[in-house]
Amino acid sequence: MTILLSTLNARYAHASLGLRYLLANMGELQGRTRLQEFVIGAKTTEVVEKLLSHAPRIIGFGVYIWNVDETTKVVAMLKRIAPGITIVLGGPEVSHETGDQDIIRMADYLVTGWGDVTFPKLCGDILDGPKPLMKIHAGAQPPMAEIAMPYALYTDEDIAHRTLYVEASRGCPFKCEFCLSALDKTAWPFGLDTFLGELESLHARGARLFKFVDRTFNLNIKTSLKIMQFFLDKLEANPDDPVYAHFELVPDHLPDALKEGIAKFPPGALQFEIGIQSFNPEVQALVSRKQDNAKAADNIRWLCEHSNAHMHVDLIAGLPGEDMASFARGFDQLVALKPHEIQFGILKRLRGTPIIRHTEQYGLVFDAYAPYTILATSLIDFQTMQRLVRFSRYWDLVANSGRFANTIERMLADAPFDNFMAFSDWIYSKTDATHRIALDRLANLVTQWLQTRGMGKEEATLLVGRDYAGRVDATAAQAHAPRPAAGVPQRQARHLAA
């Protein structure tokens, strides 16, 4: 083994698709290449020891916003202990603004952008000469048909215990300035027959959970329908051994043909992630986001009311030009549509994204360290932004968790944002914490909060207790029910049980 591909994933369940693409496309060097993944939070010394145990000549690291700090420590230690090993970096975090990153300074080489053909060529030159003189190599984008598929490299262990990431296309035609896909010129599809053949092979090996990373799954409706039909066929053939698929949808593009296909899926088989981000047209225009809000709202409402898909809808706080009142209106509008989950995100400045152009005019202040979270804007000061950060965390604990399905409606009442912000401020004043709040304690705090809002103690206890009883009953029922789709996300399982 000569070349080692490595990264630190956010959690064990995440299997790196990017590294598997590199391994699949190593050509003659594939037999001399191995992949080893870690999870963030691992001790640097242990990571380095395991890397060195393979005695590699080259180590290629996939660097992302969630692992850059820890990967920097790993590279620094490797350069102290084994300076003769060649370190090559790649990934979105190091593909932009390369002049001011310590990890790039310490590494020997960097591949920016697509690495499918550039990384193998670079490794060949390092090993066999002539040794490259340039440190930074811009990744060449090959024709999609020339990229070897990585899916056979998912191991039996991956299939049994991890999320399998797949992609029918790369890129995105939209230009939302907070997203790295804003730099893409368009979306590039893989050959559909080849891709579906890969899905067939994975399914035959036992894969049942497929998470699509495509930015615009429903951009080409004919392609979307064929992919969805693949899963419908599997569901029809084996209803007691169901598949589960996750897609990211463009919210205002849901023609009748696609609705008809979506309506055929049973509960627990389909999840959609939809990025609304903001309902404010002025803010949308400012960040180059084209969206028909009325159509998007109608489509989300239809999906919630007429399909069994689990709905996960995103909003972003801290966008330039958006104040608290505007964000609150958008939040209330989204709550009224009743998606299963609202992902309340805080803006992050991904390296290379055009959002930085608004820094001076809108007073954008970002954390200097990953994940570069917005700290303040000209319309939302630091203290208020921190309240929003806490709101996001408590929203996950109470609303998105599915543990308080009956209670949350009473908590939100006719003013969802204001009422939950009041709860967020109150619970923080009681706990001084947003993490490590035991479930029993959280339930007691929610019960207390309801009483501060005028609900009697007995009624509040009964309401929260009913949620607990529902969870217990559902757990018992599930023990005798057909097996759900393998790896259904914990939150979705709770919503299905509610």
Image: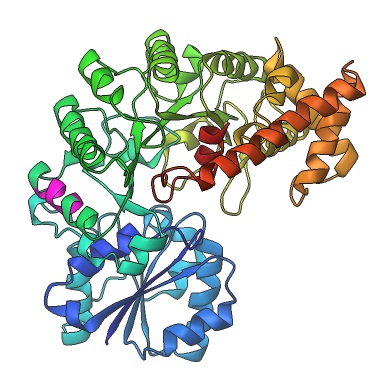
Front in this rendered view, residue 144 or 134: 144
State the residue at coordinates (39%, 24%).
288
Front in this rendered view, residue 225 or 87: 225
Q: Quadrant of residue 58?
A: bottom left
Residue 142 in the image: state x and y as whole percent: 13, 54
Question: Which quadrant, please, contains the N terminus?
Answer: bottom left
Question: In the rendered view, does 301 fall on the left or right side of 439?
Answer: left
Position of 301 relative to 371 (above/below): above
Residue 115 in the image: state x and y as whole percent: 25, 61
Question: In the rendered view, does 294 fall on the left or right side of 328?
Answer: left
Q: How many marks?
A: 0
Front in this rendered view, residue 81 or 267: 267
Report if residue 348 is visible in the image. no
State the residue at coordinates (40%, 10%).
298
Position of 145 relative to 63 (above/below): above
In magenta segment, residue 204: no
Residue 464 in the image: state x and y as whole percent: 77, 30
Q: Quadrant of residue 213?
A: top left
Q: How is the image coloured?
A: rainbow
Q: What residue span does the magenta drawing correspond to? A: 194-199
Front in this rendered view, residue 410 or 396: 410
Residue 156 in the image: state x and y as whole percent: 31, 68
Report if residue 221 is visible in the image. yes
Question: In the rendered view, does 262 fall on the left or right side of 456?
Answer: left
Question: Which quadrant, please, contains the C terminus?
Answer: top right
State the residue at coordinates (19%, 66%).
24
> What's the magenta bit mostly, secondary-structure-wise?
helix
Question: In the rendered view, does 170 fall on the left or right side of 179?
Answer: left
State the residue at coordinates (49%, 37%).
356
